[in-house]
Structure formats: C-alpha cells, structure tokens
Image (cartoon, helix red, strand yellow):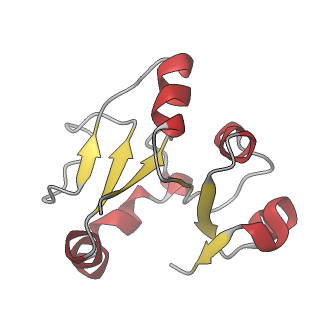
Amino acid sequence: MIINLFYPASYLHHKNHIFLKNRKIINFLEKNNINIFLTIDSNIFDINSENIKSIGRVSHSKCFEIMSNSSALLFLSGFETLGLPILEASSLKKSIIIPNLQYAKELLGKSGYFIKY
C-alpha cells in the first residue's frame, strides 16, 4: 500500500520544509511506502529522495484536486492562525498530520495526528 501525503505550502522558513531533509524521516518514508508531494519547485528545495516530490506551484483548483486524491494533509508550519489547507482537508474528511503546537491543538482538538519535530 502506498500512502500519499500532500503539503501545499510556499517555501518559507516557518513552513519547516527543512524537517523533510532529516535522514531518519527520509528512511521512514522509504521503508513505509510514503510519498510527500510539495508545491514548491525542485530547484528551490532539492532533496535526495524518490519519496519526496516537488510538483511546483499549482492553481487552487489543482491543489484541491491533489488533496482530494491524497491520503492525508501534511502541514508542518511552526505558527499559523488558520491555514486554508487545514480547512480544505477537514472538509474532505482527510487526516491531518500537524505539529504538536498550541495553534494546531486549538484547531483540530483530538482529530489531528500531532508530530514533534
């Protein structure tokens, strides 16, 4: 079984893309057949993993289509008030993998999958 995660985010420091360069994370993705699709260009975020795919900027409708076909939303932002991808994933009843931070707990309560990084 292949799991596809979608992370629609611009390449900004607080979006924590750097978390995905961790060798332990890459090994985990490869071992468990997990792919992550990023909406940034590969020339901006170069990573040596077949499981992390930079698809570049996409339109909002394409973003929603990709999220609809993904297993879950990955949202690594270090701080947000309310991100549109979180609302969209919730409306699609998608799982949301999100940092174990106060803003995320307030948004998702017990329905989020909280990670430490």
Q: Nearer the viewer, residue 105 or 30?
A: 30
Q: Is residue 65 above or below residue 95?
A: above
Q: Is residue 93 left or right of residue 2?
A: right
Q: Nearer the viewer, residue 29 or 54?
A: 29
Query: What is the quadrant of the N terminus in the image?
Result: bottom left
Image location (x, y in percent) of residue 97? 58, 64
Q: Quadrant of residue 14?
A: bottom right
Q: Residue at 12% of width from left, 59% of height from top? A: 48
Image location (x, y in percent) of residue 53? 25, 45
Image label count: 0
Q: Quadrant of residue 43?
A: top left
Image location (x, y in percent) of residue 75? 57, 55
Q: Is residue 17 above or below residue 110?
A: above
Q: Residue at 22% of width from left, 39% of height from top? A: 42
Q: Is residue 108 above or below residue 12?
A: below
Q: Is residue 47 left or right of residue 20?
A: left
Q: Is residue 59 left or right of residue 104?
A: left
Q: Residue at 37% of width from left, 43% of height from top? A: 38
Q: Is residue 103 above or below residue 58?
A: below
Q: Residue at 22% of width from left, 57% of height from top? A: 51
Image location (x, y in percent) of residue 101? 72, 73
